[in-house]
Amino acid sequence: MVLDQLLQDRGLSVAEFSNAIGISAANVAVLKNGRARAIRFSTLDAICGVLNCEPGDVLRWDQTPPDPEVTVAP
């Protein structure tokens, strides 16, 4: 995982990172595991600020079609 490697390279724990960017450790886990369906620009900005990186360093485009069994609540 890209985020795992960036955290390791910067010597940050998940707890330190979550506190620095202002989201819960559980939400960091969702990002780390690639299960996030969306991200706020303010969160992406905080991530890039803390990790001193560009958005392309933490985002990857996945062309896999979404699972039709998964529904998103309105």
Image (cartoon, rainbow, N blue to C red):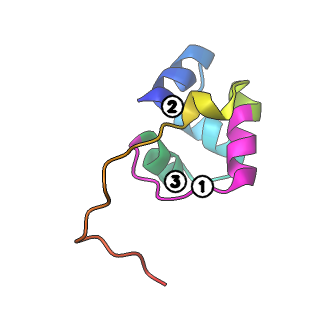
Q: Give the quarter of the image for residue 16.
A: top right
* Label 1 to label 3: alpha-carbon separation: 10 Å
**Tag 2 near tag 3, CB within 8 Å:** no
Q: Secondary structure at mark 2?
A: helix
- Residue type pointed to by label 1: Ile
Q: Nearer the viewer, residue 71 or 46?
A: 71
Residue 5 is labelled as none
Q: Is residue 8 magenta?
A: no
Residue 39 is labelled as 1
Q: How many marks?
A: 3
Label 3 sits on residue: 27
Query: Viewed as shown, does residue 57 lie left or right of 37?
Result: right
Among numbered discs 2 and 1, the one appearing first in the sequence: 2
Residue at image location 75% in from the left, 52% down from the top: 42
Question: Which tag is nearer the camera, tag 1 or tag 3?
Answer: 1
**Tag 2 near tag 1, CB within 8 Å:** no
Q: Give the quarter of the image for residue 18.
A: top right
